[in-house]
Image (cartoon, rainbow, N blue to C red):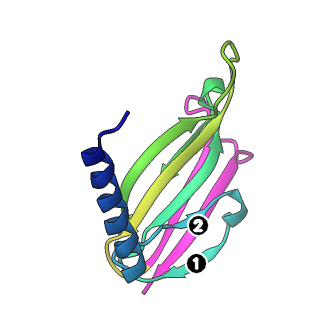
C-alpha cells in the first residue's frame, strides 16, 4: 500500500514529465528496426535515434556493429524475450540509442554473425545512414 505522500510525489513527477514532453524539452527517439535496413534518414542535431534488431545470442549469433565518429552511443543493451521456464535458445531484441555529436552524414552498420567465425559475405547485415543537419 502506498502512502498519500508517495502517491502525491508520483503524480508530481508525472505532471512534470508530461509538461516537458508537451513543451518539446524531452523528445522520444526516432525508432528504426529491420524494416529500415538500407535507408537514409534526415534528422536535426540534438535528436536521438533508437535502433532495435532481433538477436539470439544463445546460438552465438550477435550483432557486430560499427558506430562511426560523429555518433555517440548512449545505450547498448540486449533484452531477452519473455519465455516460459525451461525454454532454451530463445532470442530477444538488441537496442542501441545513438545521438549525433555534430552535423554530417553517418552510417551505423551491423553484421549478424558468430564472432568466432570467418566473414563469408553471406551474413545478414544492417545499415542505416543518418544525415544530421
Q: Mark 1 points at which residue?
A: 41
Q: Mark 2 points at which residue?
A: 128
The picture places residue 82, in percent across and down from the top left corner, at 64, 31
Viewer-proximal residue among 18 and 98: 18
The picture places residue 79, in percent across and down from the top left corner, at 54, 38
Q: Is 116 inside the magenta-drawn segment?
A: yes
Viewer-proximal residue among 129 and 97: 97
Can residue 67 be seen? Answer: no
**Left or right of residue 4: residue 110:** right
Which quadrant, please, contains the N terminus?
A: top left
The picture places residue 61, in percent across and down from the top left corner, at 63, 33
Viewer-proximal residue among 37 and 115: 37
Label 1: few (<14), some or many (≥20) within 10 Å? few
Label 2: few (<14), some or many (≥20) within 10 Å? many
11 in relation to 44, above or below: above
Q: Which SS does the magenta portion mostly show?
A: strand
Determine the residue located farthest toward the bottom in the rendered image.
133
- Span colored in magenta: 105-133
Q: How far apart are marks 1 and 2 (CA)?
A: 8 Å
Q: Which residue is drawn at 66% across and 15% down?
A: 85
Q: Callout 2: helix, strand or loop?
A: strand
Do the residues bearing badges 1 and 2 touch, measured as CB atoms within 8 Å?
yes
Can residue 12 be seen? Answer: yes
Q: Which residue is drawn at 66% across and 25% down?
A: 59
Viewer-proximal residue among 69 and 5: 5
Q: Residue at x 52, y 49 (%)?
A: 95
41 in relation to 82, above or below: below
Q: Callout 1: helix, strand or loop?
A: strand
Q: Earlier in the sequence, mark 1 or mark 2?
A: 1
Amino acid at each position: 500500500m502506498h502512502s498519500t505522500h508517495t502517491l502525491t510525489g508520483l503524480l508530481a513527477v508525472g505532471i512534470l514529465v508530461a509538461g516537458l514532453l508537451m513543451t518539446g524539452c524531452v523528445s522520444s527517439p526516432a525508432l528504426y528496426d529491420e524494416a529500415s535496413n538500407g535507408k537514409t534518414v534526415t534528422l536535426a542535431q540534438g535528436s536521438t535515434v533508437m535502433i532495435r534488431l532481433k538477436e539470439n545470442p544463445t546460438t552465438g549469433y550477435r550483432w557486430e556493429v560499427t558506430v562511426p565518429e560523429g555518433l555517440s552511443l548512449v545505450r547498448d543493451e540486449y533484452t531477452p524475450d519473455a519465455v516460459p521456464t525451461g525454454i532454451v535458445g530463445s532470442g530477444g531484441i538488441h537496442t542501441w540509442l545513438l545521438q549525433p555529436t555534430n552535423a554530417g552524414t553517418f552510417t551505423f552498420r551491423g553484421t549478424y554473425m558468430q564472432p568466432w567465425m570467418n566473414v563469408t559475405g553471406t551474413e545478414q547485415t544492417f545499415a542505416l545512414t543518418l544525415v544530421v543537419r
